[in-house]
């Protein structure tokens, strides 16, 4: 009755318990592999009433979409500013609820930090984000596993303006971007409490410069669609 043995093996192989789901760590994406001159501007730590509206105005005036990685504890204080971002067509990613560094934390704490921001966004009418930016860029295997299980892509950066240090002029920030930009670049700015007028002026300066040089702007999610090869966790 050899055919019964084959039938048993086939049935056993087909049932889900034979192939348990494997959760993969969230990939860390710092740049998109493309030849197209497209760049994503990103802004961390907001919203604030001082800097976010000024940056939004520049983006809207120049018809540029960007990605804002929002801290929940800031958004809950300024939901109207978050709504302005959404209404302007900007992409909203998560930067955690408390800006918690996800390194050497247990999985339950990591899940709570991520889920709390999801719940807040949804209570404010913002869709569940699919992109996460790690505070300080810090993570470990536990954090990346949890983020992967929760369906996130982790977004790093290829051009770090370091504007949060508040040590650089607008021209220095703009020069850093212009010197380092490449196809598929992800640029990090900040619109949080550590931002300054230098950030606003730098954004105002680089957009027309890059456009004149043939560059286009889009959100991180749209930029990812240009990727030619799959990402791997790092």
Image (cartoon, helix red, strand yellow):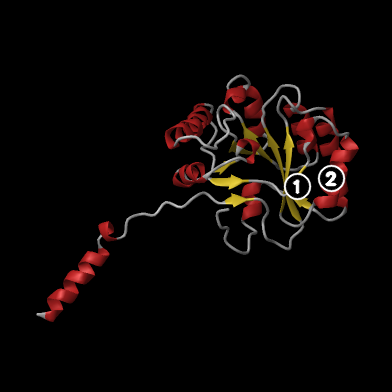
What residue is at 88 percent from the left and 47 percent from the top?
A: 209
Which residue bears the numbered disc 2?
A: 176
Q: Where is residue 233 in the image (x, y as percent from the top left)?
A: 55, 54
Answer above or below: position of 15 versus 205: below
**What is the spatial separation of the Cα atoms under label 1 and label 2, in whole angstroms?**
8 Å
Q: Which residue lies furthest to the bottom in this view?
A: 2
Q: Is mark 1 on a helix, strand or loop?
A: strand
Residue 24 position within the rendered picture, expressed as x and y whole percent measured from the top left: 46, 52
Q: Badge 1 is on which residue?
A: 159
- Callout 2: 10 Å neighbours few (<14), some, many (20+)? some
**Residue 128 point in image, percent of width and height:** 51, 37
| Left or right placement of residue 109 versus residue 21 in this view | right
- Answer whether labels 1 and 2 touch (C-beta < 8 Å): yes
Residue reaching furthest front?
A: 104
**Image position of 5 (left or right of 38):** left
Q: Residue furthest right?
A: 171
Residue 50, picture quadrant: top right
Residue 81, position in %: x, y? 66, 25
In front here: 75 or 81? Answer: 75
In the displayed structure, 122 sits above or below 182; it is above
Identify the element where label 2 is drawn.
Answer: helix
């Amino acid at each position: 009755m050899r055919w019964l043995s084959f039938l048993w093996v086939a049935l056993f192989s087909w049932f889900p318990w034979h192939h348990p789901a494997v959760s993969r760590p969230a990939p860390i994406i710092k740049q998109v592999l493309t030849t197209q001159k497209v760049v994503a501007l990103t802004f961390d730590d907001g919203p604030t009433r001082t800097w976010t509206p000024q940056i939004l105005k520049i983006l809207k005036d120049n018809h540029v979409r960007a990605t804002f990685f929002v801290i929940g504890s800031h958004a809950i204080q300024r939901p109207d500013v978050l709504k302005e971002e959404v209404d302007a067509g900007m992409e909203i990613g998560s930067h955690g609820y408390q800006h918690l560094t996800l390194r050497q934390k247990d999985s339950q704490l990591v899940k709570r930090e991520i889920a709390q921001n999801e719940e807040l966004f949804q209570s404010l009418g913002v869709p569940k984000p699919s992109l996460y930016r790690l505070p300080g860029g810090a993570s470990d295997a536990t954090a990346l596993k949890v983020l992967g299980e929760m369906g996130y892509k982790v977004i790093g950066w290829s051009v770090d303006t370091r504007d949060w240090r508040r040590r650089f002029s607008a021209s220095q920030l703009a020069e850093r971007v212009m010197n380092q930009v490449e196809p598929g670049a992800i640029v990090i700015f900040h619109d949080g409490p550590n931002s300054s007028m230098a950030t606003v002026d730098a954004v105002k300066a680089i957009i027309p410069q890059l456009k004149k040089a043939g560059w286009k702007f889009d959100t991180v999610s749209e930029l990812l669609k240009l990727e030619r090869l799959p990402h791997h966790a790092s």
